[in-house]
Image (cartoon, coloured by chain):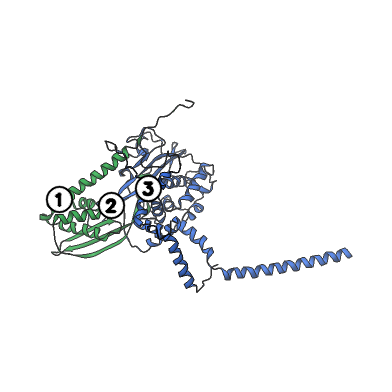
Chain colours: A blue, B green
Amino acid sequence: MYVAVKGGEKAIANAHRWQADRRRGDRRRPELEVSQLTRQLPLAVDRVMAEASLYDPELAGLALKQASGDLIEAVFLLRAYRTTLPRLAVTVPLQTDAMQIERRISATYKDIPGGQILGPTYDYTHRLLDFLLLAEGETPGPERSDRPLDPCPQVLELLDAEGLVERERDDGSEPVDITQEPPGFPADRATRLQMLARGDEGYLLALGYSTQRGYGRNHPFAGEIRQGPVEIEIEVEGYDAPVCIGEIVISECQMVNQFSGSREEAPCFTRGYGLAFGRNERKTMAMALVDRALRAGELGEPIEGPAQQMEFVLAHADSVEASGFVSHLKLPHYVDFQAELELLRRLRREHAERQAATTSTDSGEARA
Amino acid sequence: MTQIQRQRVLALTPREHLETLWDALGIRVDYRPTRGPETGMAMVRGRIGGTGRTFNLGEMTLTRASIVLIDGTPGDGWVRGRDKSHAELIALVDACARHEHWQRRIDAELIAPLADELAERREAASRTAASTRVDFFTMVRGE
């Protein structure tokens, strides 16, 4: 247990000053601007926004700079800032089918209306270091087609006229908001998705991977992955229709998984869903795998793998909570440890006394 | 053009560009803020599977402003992010557009060109995406 301590102000101030100096680095080199981070490290910025659960690229870039590039620290900073802002509105649910497509692929259907759009991606690169980036060279602008994209409808809604894939329908229910009420277990799917959306990518990736390796296998296919800006609307009193406040970039992953059925319902493919702020494709794929794994109970599957254990998965997904609890071990635990020392010394004393008593009895028996 | 259509175009236009075009329009009118501008958050909602039950994805920053013109005409503005002058300028345009003599000019000389530019930006982005459209061929195994 941690017991509060006092003092050390000067040393702490000096330590922070040194950290700021380290962050600034060699003064002969220009200082990094936040706008450079948001423009040239956009995927780091997107990850910080997604896991902080606050979409604001400039603030995420600032957090990244302030944290010297430590992503988890940056997430913590942005999450903490979040608590200083009032909630002004709840948006109309995102219409991901109205996204301005930058990337859209399906691994289940080859020929899809609108086509397979690779967008900006590291897929199909050879993962060879590009030494040209060490030199200052010009980067050519993107290629442009003569014609814009054809409409890209949602693959799973469109191509499944036979009803082979489970459909998601809105029952009009109001979702729980974990920022207003702490989640309890078992948590419903909407609550789980809110928790997964802010979950640490590395953690979700490992859990998703574990399902592929057999710990709660769910036979996934990437039904559709899409990325791009979507317009955001809010309801405003006195207006007869929702009001657009701008656009944000999001990533979505629709997994199609192994089928289930029952006496009443014909077998059909089930689904897992991933959605995240920014260009966070890997995160949404992992999220969709874990979302599907957490539906095991509802779909009557045996719960055998760690990724299927709801409380375990959800209670440890948030890097702010996890790093907070792990990091508190660094704080002075002198009193607590002193008590442990006392206890251990007493146990060892008692142990020694017992040993001594046994030895003298043994030697006594030997003499007899 | 409705108030909601105007608000959309104004929110989707970068602030500096909007300021330039607004200044060029030459509508000068005194106003005072009645609320904000204030920055807060909107909770962004998604739908399970894109079409199903709603869930809370996470929050985004949002700034709103309300003003009144000197003659008492109110105006409101909302914009993603933390740019207070952007929200206030949207509110000012909203208020001015409630006057019939300004409305026609605002729609014709501000909103319509901005809507065209927005459409052009989106078309350019769409053509860029279209250049990465790929056709995969399925190979027969052993080929």
Inter-mark Cα distance, 2 to 1: 21 Å
Mark toward the viewer: 1 or 3: 3
Residue matched to label 3: A136
Q: Tell which subunit mark 1 falls on.
A: B
| Tags 1 and 3 both on a single chain | no
Quick one: quadrant of the N terminus of chain A? bottom right
A59 left or right of A218? left
What amino acid type should be assigned to the residue bearing mark 3? Answer: Glu
Among the 4 quarters of the image, the one containing residue B136: top left
Inter-mark Cα distance, 1 to 3: 43 Å
Mark toward the start of the polypeptide (3 vs 2):
3
Residue matched to label 1: B109
Q: Tell which subunit mark 3 falls on.
A: A
Q: Bin the neighbour count of mark 3 within 10 Å (Cα to Cα): few under 14, some 14-19, many 20 and up.
A: few
Q: Tell which subunit mark 2 falls on.
A: A
The residue positioned farthest toward the bottom in the image shown: A7
User: Residue A302's x, y, as percent?
Assistant: 53, 44
Q: Are marks 3 and 2 in contact (CB under 8 Å)?
A: no
The residue positioned farthest toward the right in the image shown: A368
In depth, the one of A319 and A241 nearer the eye is: A319
Secondary structure category for the residue under label 3: loop
User: Residue A220's x, y, as percent?
Assistant: 46, 40
Which mark identifies residue A328? Answer: none
